[in-house]
Image (spheres, grey):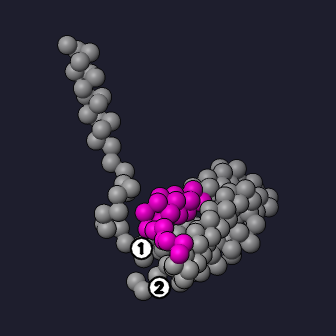
Amino acid sequence: MRFFLVSMALVLALSSVAFAHCQVPCGIYDDETRLDMLRENITTIERAMKMIPDLSDDAELNHNQIVRWIEAKNHHADDIAHIVSWYFLQQRVKPVDAGDETAYKAYVHKLTLLHGMLVQSMKAKQTTDLTHVEELKTLLDDFTKAYMVGK
């Protein structure tokens, strides 16, 4: 009986875990918020990329702060990949019929921009080269223009 109660408690505890967003496009979250979150993540990555070399050049080297900025940079790069993949690619950018040339061209353009953001967020984890941040900003601006047409 004790094993059964412990098992049930474990099942109930694990089943009550709630994630910030399911993959059902329920309309609770809006596109503008997600785009703002991407901008915020890019800004944090940029800040981290500037802080890491500054802290590394400091005579009183602070390893803990450097590690914290690296972790922050990587976390925000992962957040970009998460939003791009789970929100935009899986839920919001809908496939269109290839026969509709205009719609299909716009669809491929959006996919290309999102893929570019995924690649640049991955590259941002590998280095402190600010060109990846600039590319992320450009890609996000271009995607925002392409995606928000008619919204």
Residue at position x 42%, y 86% from top? 150
Is residue 63 rendered to the left or right of residue 118?
right
Q: Which span of residues is magenta-colored?
A: 77-99
Circle 2: residue type:
Val
* Residue linked to disc 1: 31
Front-most of 106 and 149?
106
Q: Quadrant of residue 58?
A: bottom right
Q: Position of residue 30 (x, y in %)?
A: 37, 72
Q: Nearer the viewer, mark 2 or mark 1?
A: 2
Instruction: Check the image and report above or below for 114 versus 14.
Output: below
Is residue 77 rendered to the left or right of residue 3?
right
* Residue linked to disc 2: 149
Q: Quadrant of residue 5?
A: top left
Whether residue 89 is visible here, answered yes or no, is yes
Residue extending farthest top: 1
Q: Main secondary structure of the magenta part?
A: helix
* CA separation in Å, label 2 and label 1: 12 Å
Residue at position x 48%, y 71% from top? 96
Q: Position of residue 22 (x, y in %)?
A: 36, 54
Residue at position x 76%, y 66% from top? 129
- Marked residue nearer the N-terminal end (2 or 1): 1
Circle 1: residue type:
Asp
Residue at position x 64%, y 79% from top? 138
Q: Position of residue 43 (x, y in %)?
A: 59, 71
Instruction: Check the image and report above or below for 19 versus 102.
Output: above
User: Where the C terminus falls, by quadrant?
Assistant: bottom left
